[in-house]
Image (cartoon, rainbow, N blue to C red):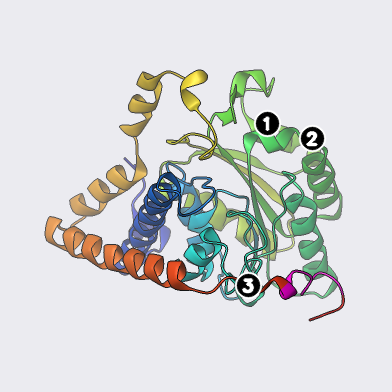
């Protein structure tokens, strides 16, 4: 549970309640998508479960009316906080024509929505880092006070794009915040077999920027780190690297069997620190949330998820003739 107090961070009771609600919605949407996948209705799920606190804590620390996000495939919490709706996410899961990410062309988790400044993602991991750095370069060249925020898993921090992006951002003092969601596994490869340094944040020194490791299960700790990084960025002090230590509660994806590389007891132990539970406890102890309010929220979110599911399942697929729309000349 957080040792930080939301009031000390300038957050109101209503804001932290909204943070929890967004975390809860992300979790319930994700759980529904797994059920839909297992019943043969949607083809693929790549889960955010266990990482919602890092995602929502970070997103709420940004200026969501002007900043840009370059999320990675698990970041349902980030895109919800930036304005993507439950219906839009379900349209993507069902690969329907109205899917705002790709018109049903891409796998789920490939987020992108121009109106909410969510940069389109790609299947090769880490390509979003140079893109986010490019947006930050534009902010500096145009002398505008927005920042770009990019996320990735710790496995992706071993790719060349990570080095090239952070090195360029450090050299040019660009307003970009890179957050590594360290969930301990790059698919089946544990952290200690991926990275020689104790923490991914240790690498920041080589790029000439501050690096900080925070508890990714504590949305307030992540909020504080990202808020401070944003303040530095808009003050012209350059980029930051934040490592949020978290844990992936599900298999890597709906096509993965995580029983082959980690023990059931390890996952059960991690569930004791599930941020949905610990943040709920914090809010109740702070007198912001009651069991009754939580039940009302649960019913409200269940209704949102049900409506989104029904809407997306009954929505139309794209016509075959639209396969090349937005790809070449046709707009």
**SS for tag 1?**
helix
Name the residue rendered at 33%, 26% in the picture. 268
From this view, report whether residue 310 is shown above or below residue 275.
below
Q: CA distance from mark 2 to mark 3?
A: 47 Å
Q: Which residues are magenta?
A: 321-328
Residue placed most toward the observer, 308 or 114 = 308
10 Å crowding of disc 3: few (<14), some (14-19), many (20+): some
From this view, report whether residue 76 is shown above or below residue 1.
below
Count the marks: 3
Q: Position of residue 100 (x, y in %)?
A: 60, 71
Q: Nearer the viewer, mark 2 or mark 3?
A: 3
Q: Position of residue 32 (x, y in %)?
A: 37, 53
Q: Is residue 4 magenta?
A: no
Name the residue rendered at 72%, 38% in the picture. 204
10 Å crowding of disc 1: few (<14), some (14-19), many (20+): some
Q: Which mark is residue 318?
A: 3
Residue at numbered disc 2: 206
Q: CA distance from mark 3 to mark 1?
A: 46 Å
* Figure quadrant of the N terminus: top left
* Figure quadrant of the C terminus: bottom right
Q: On the rendered structure, is 152 left or right of 45? A: right
From this view, report whether residue 265 is shown above or below residue 74.
above
Of the numbered discs 2 and 3, the one sitting upstream in the chain is 2
Residue at numbered disc 1: 202
**SS for tag 3?**
loop
- Do residues under tags 2 and 3 come within 8 Å of each other at their CB atoms? no
Name the residue rendered at 35%, 56% in the picture. 6
């Amino acid at each position: 549970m957080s040792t930080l107090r939301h009031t000390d961070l300038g957050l109101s009771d209503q804001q932290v309640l909204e943070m929890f609600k967004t975390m809860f919605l992300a979790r319930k949407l994700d759980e529904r998508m797994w059920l839909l996948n297992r019943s043969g209705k949607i083809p693929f799920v790549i889960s955010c479960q266990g990482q919602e606190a890092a995602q929502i804590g970070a997103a709420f620390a940004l200026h969501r009316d002007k900043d840009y996000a370059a999320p990675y495939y698990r970041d349902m919490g980030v895109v919800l906080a930036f304005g993507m709706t439950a219906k839009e996410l379900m349209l993507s899961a069902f690969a329907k024509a109205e899917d705002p990410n790709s018109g049903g062309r891409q796998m789920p988790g490939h987020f992108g929505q121009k109106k909410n400044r969510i940069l389109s993602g790609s299947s090769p991991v880490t390509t979003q880092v140079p893109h986010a750095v490019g947006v930050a370069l534009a902010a500096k060249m145009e002398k505008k006070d927005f920042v770009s925020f990019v996320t990735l898993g710790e496995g992706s921090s071993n790719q060349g794009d990570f080095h090239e992006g952070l090195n360029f951002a450090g050299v040019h003092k660009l307003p970009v915040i890179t957050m590594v969601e360290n969930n301990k596994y790059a698919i089946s490869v544990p952290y200690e077999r991926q990275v020689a340094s104790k923490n991914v944040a240790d690498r920041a020194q080589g790029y000439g920027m501050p690096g900080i490791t925070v508890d990714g299960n504590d949305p307030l700790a992540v909020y504080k780190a990202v808020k401070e990084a944003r303040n530095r960025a808009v003050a012209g002090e350059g980029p930051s690297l934040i490592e949020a230590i978290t844990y992936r509660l599900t298999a890597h994806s709906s096509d993965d069997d995580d029983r082959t590389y980690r023990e059931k007891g390890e996952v059960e132990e991690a569930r004791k620190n599930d941020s949905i539970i610990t943040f709920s406890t914090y809010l109740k102890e702070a007198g912001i949330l009651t069991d009754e309010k939580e039940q009302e929220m649960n019913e409200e979110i269940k209704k949102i998820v049900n409506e989104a599911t029904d809407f997306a399942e009954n929505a139309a697929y794209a016509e075959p003739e639209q396969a090349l729309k937005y790809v070449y000349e046709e707009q």
